[in-house]
Image (cartoon, helix red, strand yellow):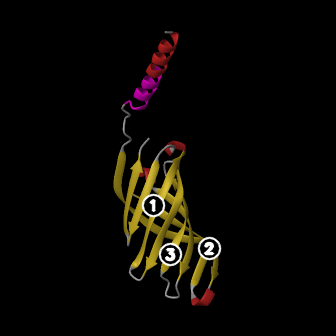
C-alpha cells in the first residue's frame, strides 16, 4: 500500500512540473522599422591581398552612422572581411558594434554579398547595457535597410 502512495505522489509531482512548464508565457514584442546607414570613414584599411588576381580583405574597419528607431541611432564600427573576385564581386562577412546616442550597445555578426548591382547583407546582434536581453536583425538589400528588434 505504501508503494502505491509513493507512486501516486511521484506521478502527481511529475504532472505538476509538466503543467508548470507549459504555463502560458507572455510573448516578447517584435518591432520592425526602416533604417538608413551612411558611410562616415575608413578607420583601418586592414590587410588586402590579391591571390590569382582576386581580392581578399581581412580586418578592414569602417565607421557608419545608423538612423531609424532611437534604439539604433548611433555610430556603428564595422569589421569587413571579403573574398572577392577580380571584378569586386563575391562574399563578405564580419562583425559590428553599434553605440547608440542613448548610450546603449549592440554587437553582432553579419554576412552578405557584393554583386554587380550593389551589396546585400544580413546581420544579427545582441543588446547590452540598457538593451540587455534584446535581439536585433538587420536586412540590407541594395540600399533598403530594415531592422527587427525583439524586446525583453
Q: Residues within 10 Å of mark 1 (few under 14, many from 20)?
A: many
The residue beneath circle 3 is 91
Query: Which residue, as the protein is rendered here, is positioned at the far top?
Result: 1
Q: Nearer the viewer, mark 2 or mark 3?
A: 3
Whichever of callouts 3 and 1 sits on the residue coming sooner in the sequence is 1
Q: Nearer the viewer, mark 2 or mark 1?
A: 2
The residue beneath circle 2 is 58
The residue beneath circle 1 is 66
Q: Up-down: is 113 above or below 37?
A: below
Q: Residues within 10 Å of mark 3 (few under 14, many from 20)?
A: some
- Across and down, in percent, residue 98 comes to 52, 57
Mark 3 secondary-structure assignment: strand
Query: Which residue, as the protein is rendered here, is positioned at the far bottom?
Result: 53
> Alpha carbon of mark 2 to alpha carbon of mark 1: how far?
23 Å
Mark 1 secondary-structure assignment: strand
Residue 91 in the magenta stretch? The answer is: no
> Alpha carbon of mark 3 to alpha carbon of mark 1: how far?
23 Å
Q: Nearer the viewer, mark 3 or mark 1?
A: 3
Q: Quadrant of residue 25?
A: top left
* Segment tinted magenta in the rendering: 13-23
Nearest the camera: 125 or 105?
A: 125
Q: Is residue 17 visible?
A: yes
Are dots 2 and 3 in contact, CB under 8 Å? no
Whichever of callouts 2 and 1 sits on the residue coming sooner in the sequence is 2
Nearest the camera: 140 or 92?
A: 92
Q: Is residue 44 visible?
A: no
* Count of residue discs: 3
- Across and down, in percent, residue 9 comes to 47, 16
Q: Residues within 10 Å of mark 2 (few under 14, many from 20)?
A: some
- Which residue appears at 59% of the width and 80% of the height? 56
> Alpha carbon of mark 2 to alpha carbon of mark 3: how far?
12 Å
- The answer to whether 13 appears left or right of 61 in the picture is left
Amino acid at each position: 500500500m505504501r508503494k502505491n502512495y509513493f507512486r501516486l505522489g511521484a506521478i502527481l509531482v511529475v504532472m505538476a512540473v509538466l503543467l508548470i512548464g507549459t504555463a502560458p508565457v507572455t510573448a516578447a514584442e517584435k518591432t520592425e522599422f526602416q533604417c538608413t546607414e551612411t558611410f562616415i570613414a575608413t578607420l583601418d584599411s586592414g590587410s588586402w591581398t590579391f591571390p590569382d588576381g582576386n581580392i581578399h580583405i581581412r580586418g578592414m574597419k569602417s565607421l557608419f552612422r545608423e538612423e531609424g528607431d532611437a534604439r539604433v541611432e548611433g555610430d556603428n564600427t564595422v569589421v569587413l572581411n571579403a573574398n572577392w573576385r577580380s571584378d569586386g564581386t563575391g562574399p563578405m562577412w564580419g562583425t559590428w558594434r553599434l553605440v547608440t546616442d542613448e548610450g546603449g550597445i549592440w554587437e553582432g555578426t553579419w554576412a552578405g554579398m557584393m554583386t554587380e548591382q550593389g551589396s546585400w547583407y544580413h546581420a544579427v546582434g545582441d543588446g547590452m547595457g540598457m538593451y540587455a536581453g534584446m535581439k536585433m536583425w538587420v536586412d540590407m538589400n541594395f540600399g533598403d535597410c530594415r531592422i527587427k528588434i525583439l524586446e525583453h
